[in-house]
C-alpha cells in the first residue's frame, strides 16, 4: 500500500504533514496509519486543489470522495470504474458500510481469480494441442477460446435464439415471456457489468494515447445464454470520444461490441442433515458477538424459533375473504361455484366468499345468481357466503372497494374473478405469502388459450391444470389477482373508483403498492388457472383501456408457434405433427 503512493505529483501539490511522496507508514500500524492519514489528506484536499489545477483530475481519481449530506457517510454505488481505480474511498464511516465494502472487494477478488482459472484452462488446452496430449472433457470445454460457433446445433429446435434489446426494453420470442417487457433488475445489472468491463478495457491505455472514451448509452443489442458456455452479447454502443492531447476534440461515436462471458467450473457443496434446535441456538449465540454493530444489520438479530413458528401457524390458519365482482355471465358463475364447492365447501376451508353483484336488479340473470347462492347456502349452512348488491355501471375497482369497505383492518383479502378456478394449495400460498404491513402476494396466473384451436376436436376432461406452451401462457403482465390485508389496501390508497369498465384498475393498485414501500411477492402459481373465454372489447372504452383489451384478446387465441403452423398449413399446405407440449 505504501509503495502505491509514489506517483509523480508536482512538489507544490504535496500534502503535508499527512503523507508525502514516497513516505511509507510504519509496517506495524500500516493499515491504521493509512486509514486515518487518508482522512486527514482528504480534509485538506480543497486547499490543495486550488493551487494544483494540472493535477486536479488525477487527484480526484486517486482519492475518491463522494460526500453528500443525505447519504450520511455512505457510498451507494460501488460497482464503477471510479471505485476500482481509487486507492482511497471516502466516506465509509459506519461498521455496516465497511462490511459491505469489504464484501464487495472480496467478490471482486473472487471474480478475478475465477477469470484467471479460465485463462489457465485456455493455456492448458493450447499446450495440449502443441504437445499432442489429451485433456479431460471438462477441461477441454473450459479451455475453448471465445467464439460464436462453440455450440453447433444439429436441429432447428437446438438453435439458441437471441433476444433483442434496447436501453429500456427486451423483446423476446420465448413463449414463456411477453413479446416486449422492461429490462428487469437482473438483466440491467448484467448489462451494467458488461459495459463497465468493456469501458475499462477500452480506456486501459487512455493516458498514453491522449484520449478517453466515455459510455453514453446502449443503442440496441442482442443477448442469449448458452447453457454450456456462457452469456453472449452483441451491443451497439454510443460512446463519447474525448481527446485531451494536442487539439482537444469531443466527438460522439458508435461501436459494435461482440462479447462473451464464459462460465467457469461449477462448485457444489453438500451439507448433512441440520438439527433445527442446534441451528437456532448457534444463531442466537453468534448474534450476541455482533451487538456492537448498527441495528440496521438485521441479519444478525436473534432468531426466535418458537415465535416465528407460532406466527406461521396463525397465518396458515387465517380466514381468507374472497371478493368476486360479477355482472351477468351466469354459466361461468355456475362453473366458479362448482369449483368453490369442491375446493372450499366440502373440505371446510376457512374462507368467506363475497359476491359483489353489480346491477343485479336490472340484469336478466340476477335472479338466477341469487337463487344459486341460496341453494349453496342451504346445502352448506355453516359456510360463510354473502351477496353484496351494487347498482350502476360495472366498475371492478368500485366493486372491490365496496366489498372490502365493511371489513376490519386485519382481514386477509383475495381479489378474485369469476373466470378463475383454483385449488386449496393456492389458498395456502395466499396466506403464507401475505404479511400484514410488509408483503403483498401477486400470483402470476396461467391463462388458457382457446381450447377449440388448441385441441381441435375439443378439450379433454382433465385439461384445466395442464401447463404447456400450447395450452396457455403465464399472464405475467396481469395484476388483477392479489392477496393483501385490508390495512395495507387502505395504506396504499385503495382502488381508483373513477375507472369504469374493463382494465387499468389493477395496474393502478399495483403501482400504488410498489410506491408505498410494501414488498411485492410475485411468482408463478400452479394452483390457479384463468379459464379461456371470448373477450368483447367495447369501442366506447377509454382509448388506453380499449387498446389493452384488444392486446389481451389477441394474446389468448393460441401460441405464436401454433398460429404460424395454422397459417402455413392453410396457405402453403404444410402439415405438422401436433403435440400438446
Image (cartoon, rainbow, N blue to C red):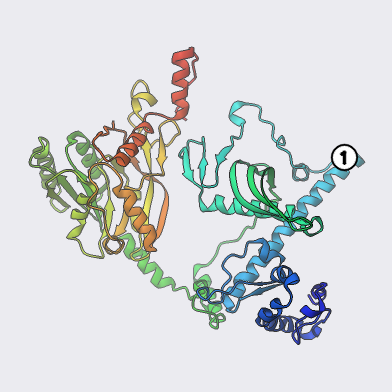
Q: Residue at x 84, y 79 (%)?
A: 22
Within the image, what quadrant is residue 214 found in?
bottom right
542 shown above or below 60: above
Q: Residue furthest front?
A: 247
Q: Left or right? Give the position of 525 relative to 28.
A: left
**x and y percentages locating residue 222 in the rendered image:** 60, 40
For residue 502, say whether it is visible: yes
Q: Residue at x 73, y 81 (%)?
A: 34
Q: Left or right? Give the position of 272 relative to 10.
A: left
**x and y percentages locating residue 265 in the rendered image:** 71, 50
346 shown above or below 489: above
**x and y percentages locating residue 400 in the rendered image:** 22, 52
Q: Residue furthest bottom?
A: 17
Within the image, what quadrant is residue 8 found in?
bottom right
Residue at numbered disc 1: 129
User: How many numbered marks, from 0 up?
Assistant: 1
**Local crowd at mark 1 within 10 Å, few (<14), some, or many (≥20)?**
few
Of residues 253 and 517, the one drawn nearer to the viewer in this rendering: 253
Q: Residue at x 25, y 62 (%)?
A: 411
Of residues 489 and 485, the one drawn nearer to the viewer in this rendering: 489
Mark 1: secondary structure: helix
Of residues 74 and 52, the one drawn nearer to the viewer in this rendering: 52
Within the image, what quadrant is residue 558 found in?
top left
**x and y percentages locating residue 436 in the rendered image:** 33, 64
Q: Residue furthest right?
A: 131
Of residues 92 and 346, the one drawn nearer to the viewer in this rendering: 92
For residue 459, say whether it is visible: no
Quadrant in which the N terminus is drawn: bottom right
Amino acid at each position: 500500500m505504501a509503495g502505491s503512493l509514489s506517483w509523480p505529483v508536482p512538489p507544490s501539490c504535496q500534502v503535508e504533514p499527512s503523507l508525502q511522496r514516497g513516505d511509507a507508514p510504519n509496517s506495524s500500524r500500516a493499515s491504521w496509519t493509512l486509514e486515518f492519514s487518508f482522512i486527514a489528506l482528504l480534509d485538506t484536499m480543497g486547499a490543495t486543489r486550488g493551487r494544483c489545477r494540472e493535477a486536479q483530475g488525477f487527484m480526484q481519481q486517486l482519492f475518491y470522495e463522494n460526500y453528500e449530506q443525505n447519504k450520511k457517510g455512505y457510498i451507494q454505488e460501488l460497482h464503477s470504474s471510479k471505485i476500482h481505480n481509487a486507492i482511497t474511498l471516502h466516506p465509509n464511516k459506519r461498521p455496516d458500510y465497511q462490511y459491505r465494502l469489504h464484501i464487495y472487494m472480496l467478490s471482486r477478488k473472487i471474480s478475478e481469480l475465477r477469470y484467471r482459472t479460465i485463462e489457465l484452462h485456455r493455456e492448458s488446452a493450447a499446450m495440449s494441442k502443441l504437445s499432442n496430449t489429451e485433456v479431460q472433457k471438462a477441461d477441454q470445454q473450459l479451455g475453448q477460446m471465445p467464439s460464436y460457433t462453440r455450440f453447433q446445433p444439429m436441429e432447428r429446435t437446438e438453435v439458441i435464439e437471441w433476444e433483442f434489446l434496447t436501453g429500456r426494453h427486451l423483446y423476446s420470442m420465448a413463449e414463456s415471456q411477453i413479446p416486449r417487457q422492461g429490462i428487469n433488475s437482473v438483466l440491467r445489472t448484467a448489462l451494467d457489468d458488461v459495459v463497465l468491463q468493456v469501458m475499462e478495457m477500452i480506456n486501459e491505455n487512455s493516458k498514453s494515447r491522449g484520449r478517453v472514451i466515455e459510455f453514453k448509452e446502449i443503442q440496441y443489442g442482442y443477448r442469449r445464454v448458452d447453457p454450456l458456455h456462457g452469456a453472449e452479447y452483441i451491443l451497439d454502443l454510443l460512446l463519447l470520444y474525448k481527446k485531451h492531447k494536442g487539439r482537444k476534440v469531443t466527438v460522439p461515436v458508435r461501436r459494435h461490441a461482440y462479447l462473451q462471458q464464459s462460465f467457469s467450473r461449477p462448485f457444489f457443496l453438500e451439507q448433512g442433515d441440520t438439527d433445527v434446535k442446534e441451528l437456532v441456538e448457534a444463531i442466537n449465540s453468534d448474534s450476541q458477538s455482533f451487538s456492537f454493530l448498527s441495528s440496521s444489520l438485521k441479519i444478525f438479530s436473534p432468531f426466535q424459533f418458537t415465535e416465528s413458528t407460532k406466527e406461521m401457524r396463525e397465518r396458515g390458519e387465517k380466514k381468507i375473504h374472497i371478493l368476486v365482482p360479477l355482472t351477468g355471465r351466469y354459466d361461468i358463475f355456475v362453473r366458479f361455484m362448482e369449483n368453490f364447492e369442491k375446493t372450499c365447501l366440502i373440505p371446510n376451508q376457512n374462507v368467506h366468499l363475497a359476491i359483489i353483484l353489480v346491477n343485479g336488479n336490472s340484469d336478466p340473470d340476477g335472479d338466477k345468481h341469487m337463487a344459486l347462492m341460496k341453494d349453496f347456502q342451504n346445502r352448506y349452512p355453516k359456510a360463510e357466503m354473502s351477496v353484496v348488491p351494487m347498482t350502476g355501471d360495472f366498475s371492478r375497482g368500485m366493486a372491490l372497494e365496496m366489498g372490502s369497505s365493511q371489513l376490519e383492518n386485519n382481514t386477509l383479502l383475495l381479489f378474485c374473478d369469476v373466470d378463475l378456478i383454483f385449488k386449496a394449495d393456492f389458498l395456502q400460498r395466499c396466506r403464507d405469502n401475505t404479511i400484514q404491513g410488509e408483503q403483498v402476494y401477486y400470483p402470476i396466473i396461467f391463462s388458457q388459450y382457446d381450447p377449440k384451436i388448441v385441441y381441435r376436436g375439443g378439450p379433454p376432461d382433465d385439461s384445466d391444470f395442464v401447463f404447456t406452451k400450447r395450452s396457455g401462457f403465464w399472464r405475467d403482465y396481469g395484476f388483477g389477482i392479489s392477496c393483501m390485508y385490508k390495512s395495507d389496501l387502505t395504506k396504499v390508497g385503495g382502488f381508483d373508483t373513477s375507472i369504469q369498465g374493463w382494465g387499468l384498475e389493477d395496474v393502478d393498485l399495483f403501482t400504488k403498492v410498489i410506491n408505498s414501500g410494501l414488498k411485492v411477492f410475485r411468482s408463478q402459481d400452479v394452483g390457479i388457472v384463468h379459464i379461456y373465454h371470448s373477450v368483447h372489447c367495447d369501442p366506447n372504452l377509454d382509448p388506453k383501456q380499449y387498446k389493452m383489451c384488444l392486446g389481451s384478446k389477441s394474446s389468448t387465441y393460441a401460441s405464436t408457434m401454433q398460429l404460424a403452423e395454422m397459417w402455413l398449413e392453410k396457405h402453403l399446405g404444410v402439415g405438422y405433427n401436433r403435440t400438446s407440449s
